[in-house]
Image (spheres, helix red, strand yellow):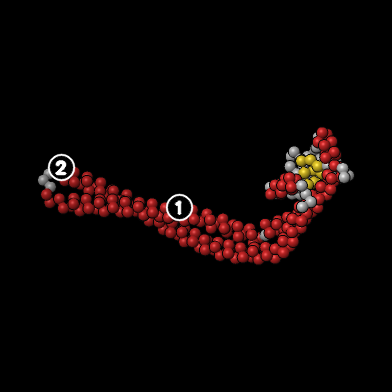
Amino acid sequence: MNIYALEVIMLQNILAYQEIDKHLMKIENLLGSSEERKIAARAKSFLEESAKNAARMEQRAEELLNMYNDARKAYEENAQLIREYDATVATLKSSDEAAYLVKKVNQALDNIKALEKELAAIQKDMEDLAKAFNDFRAKYNAAGKEYVENREKYEKLKQEYAPAVKELKAKLDEQAKNIDPQILEKYLKRRADRIFPVLVEVRGNMCGGCSMEISLKEMDKLRSKKIIECENCHRFIYFNE
């Protein structure tokens, strides 16, 4: 058998392999685009991101608690100062001392007013955070339920197609015996990159996959070798007389 005949046979074998693979790819696409899988994937993504969100909320809660405790401590310190100032009123000996005491009391009162506003703001932030956490927890529980339900539906759908997938893979394994391992390796690499069909027939002087024009040099090579690689989409272009 001459080289030309061997090339033709090899091309026929790889095309036969691709024809079987086409049916497997159809099932894979159907499963991959199923609503059950999409919903489960979205829910899983939310659940995975939830750990980070929960950690951020916990950190923020700790920050707010520290801020509240610091402000509360400062409030109590200023209140204590006012009590101490009140206790010294009877010991004042001059109007200057009285004026100085009034100034210190007013400063403490101003501090207390500012701290009251700060405490109210912090408390509001804590209430908002608590509400956000409750909402988050409700969404987390719903996402967990959604993930489990749709994951089960998706697994059931996969099981329905499992016999067909098994049969097609067995046919592919059998057909692979008729293909050069190096050629098959290149084919599988492109398939893994979601390039399909991997082999396309030339259309005039254009790639049958991406419609890129093929140079005269490459056309001569295609006519002689029967198969070349598209420089644009990396599919295998074949020439079938």
Q: Residue at x 30, y 54 (%)?
A: 72
Visible in this render: residue 187?
no
Q: Which residue is mark 1?
A: 56
Which SS class for mark 2? Answer: helix
Visible in this render: residue 132?
yes
225 versus 176 height, above or below: above
Q: Residues within 10 Å of mark 1 (few under 14, many from 20)?
A: few
Report x, y in % for residue 39: 61, 60
Q: Residue at x 81, y 52 (%)?
A: 16
Q: CA distance from mark 1 to mark 2?
A: 53 Å
Q: Residue at x 16, y 46 (%)?
A: 98
Which is more toward the observer, 19 or 148? 19
Q: Amino acid at mark 1?
A: Arg
Q: Residues within 10 Å of mark 2 (few under 14, many from 20)?
A: few
Which is more toward the observer, 93 or 27? 27
Residue that sits furthest to the top in the current view: 217
Report x, y in % for residue 144: 54, 62
Q: Residue at x 38, y 51 (%)?
A: 63
Which is more toward the observer, 171 or 99? 171
Which SS class for mark 1? Answer: helix
Residue that sits furthest to the right in the current view: 241
**Residue mark closest to the camera, 1 vs 2:** 1
Q: Which residue is mark 2?
A: 96
Label 1 or label 2, whichever comes before in sequence order: 1
Report x, y in % for residue 164: 74, 62
Report x, y in % for residue 165: 72, 60
